[in-house]
Amino acid sequence: MISATQKQRRFGLAMPAVLFIAVLMGGPMLIMVFVSLVERAPDGGVVWGRFTTAAYTQFFYEENLLGEMSFNTDYMQIYLRSIYLSGFTVLATFVVGFPTAMYIAMQEPRRRALLIFFLSLPFWVNLLVRNYAWLLLLRANGLLDQVLMGLWITSEPLNILYTNTAIAIGLTYSFLPLMVLPVYAAMEKFDFSLVEAAFDLGANRVQALLHVIFPGVKGGIIAGCLLVFIPCLGSYVTPVLLGGSKSLMIGNLIQAQFSAARNWPFGAALAFVLLLMVIMAAALRAVLLRGRNRREL
């Protein structure tokens, strides 16, 4: 049982960090919400003191030449595309990353450290450079097309570049380590003798995977999914280079409102909606982990 003195001591030790986070993270978020609720200036920027919800209305409606409001799904489609691509990236990184993490965790310590080192090597290269490499690989008559046509698998270029497929490939490559590392951390602590016990009790490999390994590393899987899904939603570099102007994602849309369109309130409103989506994803993780802890108790 924790005494009142110990609680006060812990609270006092945590307060500097809490205040630091509140000022440097909460402050910009409040400014963003405030900007989204003020009127747009004719030459860009905002008109301070004139509050309106027009930026949020613009998300769903647009005004035609006659001044009439009509329902507009363009921005919703961009958000749905971002959610779809982020969800696909989570699935793809999990399919590749889970067996990779399991393989690394089952190696001897020295080889395990070497494999983790190789896994972290992409982080040593700038994300822009890595995406430019994929641009050269996926372009028409690029290396991928030349290899496939040289092997007589295809007879013409695939034209993958500037499509959702190219964005999905780039996002999967960019965020794969963020799935492998938390799953590996959970795998490293997992007792693999439980799998042997499951085999002794008559379970096959699929049953051992579903009923022993997955529940045992559930925390790492949830953490990996969130670490991939959340940054994918706001990804900017990969959609710009590999998707072009045909496949906008949320990050590109927000950047366009603050730069080319100079519509700061609408850009702030879009960013706030993105923030709500991130909070919902974090809340879902908390609910899943709380349910897991209750079952363990």
Image: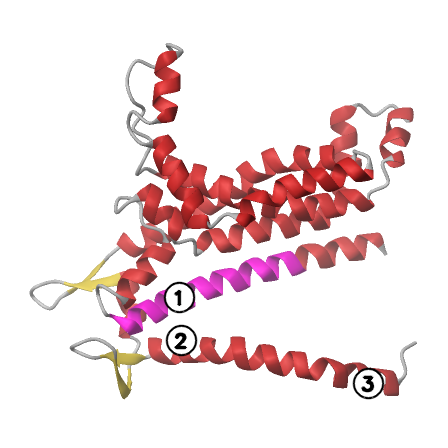
| Picture quadrant of residue 135 | top left
Mark 3–mark 1 distance (CA, rounded to whole Å): 37 Å
Q: Which residue corresponds to mark 2? A: 32
Q: Tag 1: residue type?
A: Ala
- Comparing 230 with 279, the one in front is 230
- Which circle marks residue 9 in the picture? 3
Q: Earlier in the sequence, mark 3 or mark 2?
A: 3
- The local secondary structure at tag 1 comes to helix
Nearest the eye: 56 or 5:
5
Instruction: Of the two numbered discs 1 and 2 on the same chain, state the one appearing first in sequence.
Output: 2
Residue under the point 82% across and 85% down: 9
Callout 1: 10 Å neighbours few (<14), some, many (20+)? many
Crowdedness near tag 3: few (<14), some (14–19) or many (≥20) residues, C-alpha within 10 Å: few
- In the image, taking residue 22 as reference, residue 249 lies left or right, namely left
Magenta residues, as a range? 263-286
Drawn side of residue 29 relative to residue 194, left or right: left
Q: Nearer the viewer, residue 108 or 212?
A: 108
Number of the label disc, if any, that sits on residue 260: none
